[in-house]
Image (cartoon, rainbow, N blue to C red):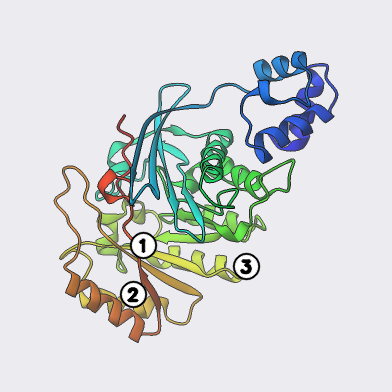
Amino acid sequence: MDLTGRREAVGELGLAAFRADQVSRQWLSRLSFDPEDWTDVSPGDRTLIEQALLPPLMDEVNHLACDEDTTVKSVWRLHDGSLVESVFMDYGDRVTMCVSSQAGCGMNCPFCATGQAGLTRNLSTAEIVQQVLVGSRWVRDLPDSRTRVSNVVFMGMGEPLANYAAVVAAIRRLIAAPPEGLGMSARGITVSTVGLVPRIDDLADEGLPVRLAVSLHAPDDELRDTLVPVNTRWRVSEVLDAAWRYAHSTGRRVSIEYALIRDINDQAERARMLVDLLRGHLVHVNLIPLNPTPGSIWTASDPEVEREFVRILREGGISTTVRDTRGREIDGACGQLAAKS
């Protein structure tokens, strides 16, 4: 709920509206999830609010760490038994949470473990926000002065724009000032999509300056039809046109995500095609060495092929980086989230 909805809900319980503000500060600012610790709320009111408005959302059933505990993957069991994953990444100067927006995914991309699992259901706004809240509690346990998650990427399980209403509502909770939300910067939030064109245009109209990341993976329709099956509905040109409209509307640079797959999409010819598509636009290419997934026949490009692909893009005037593959050994990297408990 937004703050108005919380006040109304508390009022329906026969309580004063300011109780909603108190509970919001406890939950979202102090990150206190135990009503017994809410000393500014009377015990009777705590119990009533907890029972009526704060159902258990998720339980951690697996917790894996690597990179000297700076990358942590959690598997969560939701109230109906659905499993989702989130990844906590501490980069020193910032802490990023990779959150899921769906249990599973219906996009069926063949190189992605989540896509191969199929879609179970959409997550609620609360289930999305709670992943960030738990991550912020972990930040407070770090041995320094940081107090919360600084960046959120909707790059976990699911296609965020296929759960549009809940994802946009979650973003609004993340960026709203306390006591309504967490007070994060919208510029620290990235929403990834395989290219749901109507929803990209809707997001551009929301007035939220979040970064858009387009999972392109191929510059030509013939190959992208295989790698990203939704391409049969919205072609490469349509997806990129929507991305350029988004960049124009928000002033934010669009990120093009491109998983490099050996002998599939890593040819120099395709790098040059990508340059032709992107040149002159507010764009950055994020190349991703393909991460291994069970049963996949594909693998990452050879290092020299990757370097040549990067060289062609940069010499063509395209800002390009290669993504750090953190979390690979715990199946927490891009394309590996399969929610195995």
Q: Which residue type does callout 2 highlight?
A: Leu
Q: Which residue type does callout 1 highlight?
A: Leu
Residue at disc 3, secondary structure: helix
Q: Are marks 1 and 2 in contact (CB under 8 Å)?
A: yes
For the point 80% across and 27% down, which residue is it?
19
Q: Are marks 1 and 3 in contact (CB under 8 Å)?
A: no
Image quarter of residue 80: top left
For the point 51% across and 58% down, which residue is it?
94
Numbered circle sitting on residue 216: 1
Q: Is residue 140 above or below residue 124?
A: below
| Disc 1/disc 3 C-alpha distance (Å) | 21 Å
Residue at disc 1, secondary structure: loop
Q: Which residue type does callout 3 highlight?
A: Ser
Q: Which residue is mark 2?
A: 274
Give x and y (percent) for residue 77: 42, 27
Q: Is residue 9 above or below residue 146?
A: above
